[in-house]
Amino acid sequence: MINFAHRGFKGKYPENTMLAFKKAVEAGADGIEFDVHLSKDGQLVIIHDETLDRTTDGEGLVFEKTLDELQKLNAAKFYPEWDSQKIPTLKEYFEYAKNEDIITNIELKTSIIDYPGIEKKVYDLIKEYSLDEKIIISSFNHNALVKFKDIAPHIKCGVLESSRLYKPWEYVKNLGMEYYHPMNFTVNKEIAEKFAENNIGLNIWFGKADYDYSIYLPCNPTGLITDYPDKVKEFLN
């Protein structure tokens, strides 16, 4: 089972920063999950929200700022115990990940703001670093997943969902995707068994509450995407 760190080690470190990614691996994560947007000058940047206000000392929309403007901000706004952290680029992350034995789950954040061409930009960088076999692309915008599959059919993709879809295994199979990424409360053992019967992987993600992640082990998930990779590592051991 893959122990994915949600936005890096978000439970203890500033989310979606290189510090959070490195600390997740140190804690035993074998997967990293994060979110990608485009800057004003078309650079792939790692941040969760469309706006800067929650996680940085900046304000406004990510796509209204150039990379230079974004990287002058402190992405550890609410973590005074840590030094200032930059908003990382996808390229910067890949420079780190190319030397690590980890799976990377890239979420395309195109549900609210459409970033034309983001799918190809992401794939071109994956190809540049030869990381095709170590990547999962996910999104709540399922149209973006179809676009990505058209560009790179060999890259595995996961359908992100927080609602209770009717027969979700049929929906994911019809889309031609390899994984389903449901929010934890929408999954039970019966649903999980249907995904297994259809050879579709199940990566369950969790919100910010501190859950007992082990109760989902009977679902035999492919992976758990949590804020606390250290706690998942403990019960896996």
Image: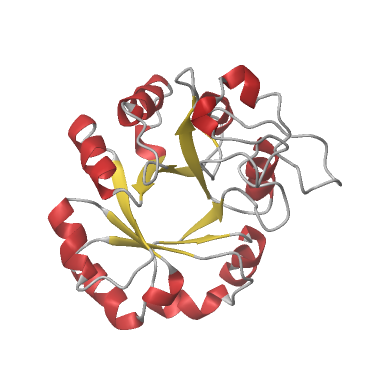
Give x and y (percent) for residue 23.
69, 46
Give x and y (percent) for residue 124.
35, 22
Give x and y (percent) for residue 27.
68, 53
From the viewer's perspective, tell me whether residue 3 is left or right of residue 192.
right
Residue at horizontal 66%, vertical 24%? 71
The answer to whether residue 225 is visible is yes
Residue at horizontal 63%, vertical 42%? 21
Q: Residue furthest left?
A: 174
Q: Is residue 17 above or below residue 232?
A: above
Q: Is residue 93 above or below residue 204?
A: above
Q: Quadrant of the N terminus?
A: bottom left
Question: Which sits in the foreground, 94 or 65?
Answer: 65
Give x and y (percent) for residue 193.
27, 76
Question: Which sits in the foreground, 160 or 104?
Answer: 160
The answer to whether residue 154 is visible is no
Q: Residue furthest right?
A: 81
